[in-house]
Amino acid sequence: MNLDALPPAPPAQVPPDAHSGLMARFRNYFLTGLIVAGPIAITFYLTWWFVTWVDGLVRPFVPIAYRPETYLPFGLPGSGLIVAVVALTLLGFLTANLIGRTLVDLGEKLLGRMPVVRAIYRGLKQVFETLFSGQGSSFRRVGMVEFPSPGMWSIVLISQAPSVEIANSLPGREEHISVFLPCAPNPTTGFFFYVPRSKVIEVEMSAEDAATLIMSCGVVQPGSDAQKKMAAIAGMADAARAANASPLQPSPAKVE
């Protein structure tokens, strides 16, 4: 029997569900890997950027003889950060005694005689003392105000009460408080305004959770702890594993 005379066999037909199943598994695997690797990569990138930024600021003040790259064939990342931490600690130690306090007072008096520098220094000093003293209550309480229009609520960080001069200039007799409304997804920009205390609804939320909520544009809600995130990742992995294990069957023929 001449095999060459036989007609060629038709090509194998791939069921349409096979392509969709492969794409679904690929998408699930990709999203699972992105959820796992994305936060880790961004965290390492920001940490590396901060370390290199501090190194670039501190390295010019360190003599060449004391730099690690002078004795090593490669640079040592983080050496500038260590020097900065040690220097700030020593500065705080020296400032705590009488001689250091006297020198700081002399420096502040010198800056206080400069018209433009005086306002900048006093403002920055008050901000740093409030944020890092651990005694103030600024930006540690979270609330909601009706903004930008009635029926729409925005997250705000509650700051200090206004000074006597500002409080006397505000209309009405109701007590006002100052709030900062961060913008999403960049919470370092926003709006600062005074609002009556009755118009602010305080919520049981930390400032860190509020910042996460704003930066994620509502994707990460308060209460989305690490266990819930890992459970979501595990659920996606189980779904992908189940899709991979299920046999691919062609869809039944449609009966006219």
Image: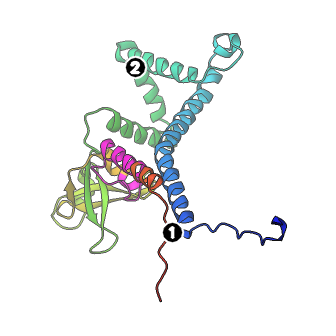
Q: Where is residue 191 drawn, in percent x and y?
A: 39, 59
In the drawing, does residue 3 fall left or right of residue 174?
right
183, above or below 36, in the image? below
Instruction: Indicate the quadrant where residue 174 lies.
Output: bottom left
Q: Which residue is disc 2 drawn over?
A: 92
58, above or below 43, in the image? above
Instruction: Indicate the quadrant where residue 216 lies.
Output: bottom left
User: Looking at the image, which is closer to me, 158 or 31?
Assistant: 31
Q: Are marks 1 and 2 in contact (CB under 8 Å)?
A: no
User: Looking at the image, which is closer to me, 173 or 142?
Assistant: 142
- In reply to whether residue 224 is colored magenta, the answer given is yes
Amino acid type at image mark 1: Pro
For residue 250, the mark is: 1
Residue visible at 50% across and 50% down?
A: 29
User: Looking at the image, which is closer to me, 191 or 118?
Assistant: 191
Local crowd size for mark 1, using a 10 Å CA cut-off: few (<14), some (14–19), many (≥20): few
Residues at marks 1 and 2, CA–CA distance in whole angstroms: 74 Å
User: Looking at the image, which is closer to me, 182 or 205?
Assistant: 205
Region rendered in magenta? 213-237
